[in-house]
Image (cartoon, rainbow, N blue to C red):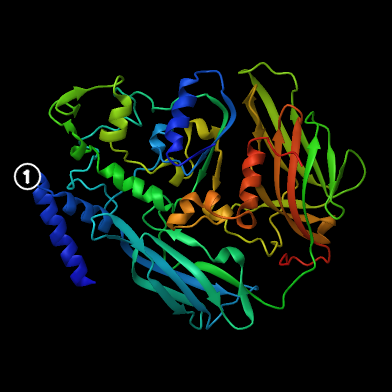
């Protein structure tokens, strides 16, 4: 590594000198640009089980994307592999790899399986600007393979009238109604008379009838375990949009506590209005509810 | 919907539409257009391991070729696509690890394209083609294509791009890597076209819903 650094410094100095005299050759420039895309990659990870306990002996495999200049003075990438094993404290590290993206491709331990989103990529020299910290390792969760819950799972799209009226969604039945009992009360409020370009109020609300919501903002979370606390009673969004535009909340992900804590679940929900000329409003929802009262949401 | 360099064309068409939207929704997929065109505050790219932009490679860099994408085309002016309103809604489908957009960044560092006869005269801050001066706005397309380095990442590799992609303060975007598993390999740049329905049904479903085209 020291030798490589030395060569890099010498090369950089040489290129710098050449630039001042406008004598950087196209090949030198290409090599510098491509080689500079590869940086030293150090990565620290921590493997835990479903309860958050360190997991020793897990086998980690992955690769990095490493750029190089081809013989024809183009450039390409290869994907050198790495392997590691977690120690007694569940930790592992990858040192002195080179490239711009590191991928965790597999996590293996007898009797366990990784959460789906644990297998992911980390961009170091990309717009993601990932950096790894030995004092704050990336946590990967593995579950015992015999942990499976009978979840009520569904995916629905409901047409709604976005005039502020309340809709009640029953996640057990996968139905929506304007009255009666259910798990979530949802409303969208927007005008149906607009002049293009003028600003109008747009608002929405999601409220569990007897429980709470907790938004998950980590896109890589598999949401297999609902938190014990941190729930709020409602989600609201108030904004203004221009006439002629549509608006939505985007795909929001929430843990839901239902029936006063006797059920937990997760939802991905989008509220859209106006939807199109024929549909004034739309609710799109994916859900998984554990009716047993367990917070485990792993199917 | 536009993919990769198609976003150069689509973005320009939507800009030229003026205040009257041509389309309900514009989905920019893996857009090969500078993020600075839409948001002058988008992250500055680095091309050197210490995190700096290399001033020794004679690539376009801040002390030399001006960033006309972020400020078009006089000092202090807004970014190139500032105020674009050709679509009712703008949504950025991006992948930070995109292979081709990593290539795109290297291409940017090769501007001005001297081999094709383009150059930048540092003494009078003028672009030249074949020895003749070329100026904005007449030669905007030539200057952007061959001369002016983007110091940012491509739109399709950048999260949280503002400007037209902001809706009530929030960027309208989808992370293709986190949400749909688009990865770091060459095939992933066109993953939505190269894969099969089993792999990409959820992706296309989301696109159709974003475009208000899917009902049931």
Horizontal relation, residue A166 to residue A194: left or right: right
Residue under the point 87% across and 48% down: A182
Residue that protrudes farthest toward the right in the picture: A180
Horizontal relation, residue B34 to residue A259: left or right: left
Residue B31 occupies which quadrant of the picture? top left
Residue A257 occupies which quadrant of the picture? bottom right
Horizontal relation, residue A66 to residue B197: left or right: left
Element carrying mark 1: loop
Compared with residue A168, is residue B24 higher up or lower down, i.e. above or below?
above
Say if residue A275 shows up in the picture.
Answer: yes
* Relative image position of residue A104 (x, y in whole percent): 48, 68
Q: Quadrant of the N terminus of chain B?
A: top right
Q: Quadrant of the C terminus of chain B?
A: top right
Residue that protrudes farthest toward the top in the picture: A195
Instruction: Decide: few, some or many residues near mark 1? Use Cα within 10 Å; few <14, some 14-19, many ≥20.
Output: few
Number of labels in the image equals: 1
> Label 1 marks which chain's residue?
A
* Relative image position of residue A142 (x, y in whole percent): 60, 73
Q: Nearer the viewer, residue A185 or A120?
A: A120
Residue occupied by mark 1:
A21
Say if residue A251 shows up in the picture.
Answer: no
Residue that protrudes farthest toward the left in the picture: A21
* Relative image position of residue B12 (x, y in whole percent): 44, 27
Compared with residue B91, is residue A62 higher up or lower down, i.e. above or below?
below
Q: Nearer the viewer, residue B96 or A215?
A: B96
Residue under the point 46% across and 50% down: B189
Residue A239 occupies which quadrant of the picture? top right
Residue under the point 47% across and 39% down: B161
* Relative image position of residue B82 (x, y in whole percent): 44, 26
């Amino acid at each position: 590594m020291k030798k490589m650094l030395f060569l890099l410094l010498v090369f950089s100095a040489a290129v710098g000198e050449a630039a001042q005299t406008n004598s950087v050759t196209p090949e030198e420039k290409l090599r510098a640009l491509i080689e500079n895309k590869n940086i030293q990659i150090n990565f620290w990870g921590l493997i835990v089980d479903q309860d958050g306990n360190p997991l020793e002996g897990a086998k980690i495999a992955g690769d990095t994307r490493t750029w190089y200049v081809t013989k024809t003075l183009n450039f390409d990438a290869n994907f050198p592999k790495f392997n590691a094993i977690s120690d007694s404290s569940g930790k592992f590290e990858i040192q002195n790899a080179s490239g711009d993206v590191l991928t965790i491709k597999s996590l293996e331990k007898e009797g366990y399986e990784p959460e789906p989103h644990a297998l992911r990529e980390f961009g170091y020299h990309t717009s993601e600007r990932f950096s790894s910290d030995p004092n704050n390792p990336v946590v990967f969760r593995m579950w015992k393979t015999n942990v499976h819950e009978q979840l009520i799972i569904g995916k629905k799209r409901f047409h709604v009238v976005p005039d502020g009226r309340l809709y009640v969604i029953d996640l057990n039945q996968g139905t929506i109604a304007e009255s009666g009992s259910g798990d979530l009360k949802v409303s969208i409020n927007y005008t149906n008379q607009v002049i293009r370009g003028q600003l109008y109020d747009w608002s929405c609300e999601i409220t569990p009838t007897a429980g709470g919501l907790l938004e998950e903002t980590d896109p890589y979370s598999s949401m297999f375990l609902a938190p014990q606390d941190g729930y709020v009673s409602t989600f609201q969004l108030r904004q203004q949009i221009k006439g002629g535009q549509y608006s939505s909340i985007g795909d929001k992900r929430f843990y839901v506590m239902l029936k006063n804590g006797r059920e937990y679940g997760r939802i991905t929900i989008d509220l859209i209005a106006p939807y199109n000329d024929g549909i004034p409003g739309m609710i799109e929802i994916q859900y998984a509810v554990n009716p047993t009262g367990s917070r485990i949401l792993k199917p | 919907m536009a993919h990769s360099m198609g976003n150069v064309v689509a973005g320009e068409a939507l800009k030229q539409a003026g205040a009257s939207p041509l389309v309900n929704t514009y989905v920019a997929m893996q857009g090969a257009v500078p993020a600075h065109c839409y948001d002058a505050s988008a992250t500055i790219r680095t091309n050197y391991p210490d995190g700096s932009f290399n001033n020794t490679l004679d690539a376009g860099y801040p002390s030399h070729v001006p960033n006309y994408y972020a400020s078009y085309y006089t000092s202090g002016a807004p970014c190139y696509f500032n105020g674009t309103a050709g679509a009712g809604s703008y949504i950025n489908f991006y992948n930070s690890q995109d292979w081709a957009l990593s290539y795109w960044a290297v291409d940017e560092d090769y501007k001005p394209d001297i081999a094709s006869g383009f150059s930048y005269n540092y003494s009078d801050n003028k672009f030249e083609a074949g020895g003749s001066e070329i100026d904005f706005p007449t030669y905007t397309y030539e200057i952007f294509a061959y001369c002016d380095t983007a110091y940012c990442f491509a739109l399709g590799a950048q999260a949280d791009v503002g400007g037209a992609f902001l809706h009530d303060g929030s960027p309208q975007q989808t992370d293709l890597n986190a949400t749909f598993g688009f990865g770091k390999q060459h095939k992933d740049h066109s993953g939505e076209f190269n894969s099969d329905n089993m792999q990409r049904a959820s992706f296309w479903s989301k696109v159709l819903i974003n475009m208000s085209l899917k009902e049931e």
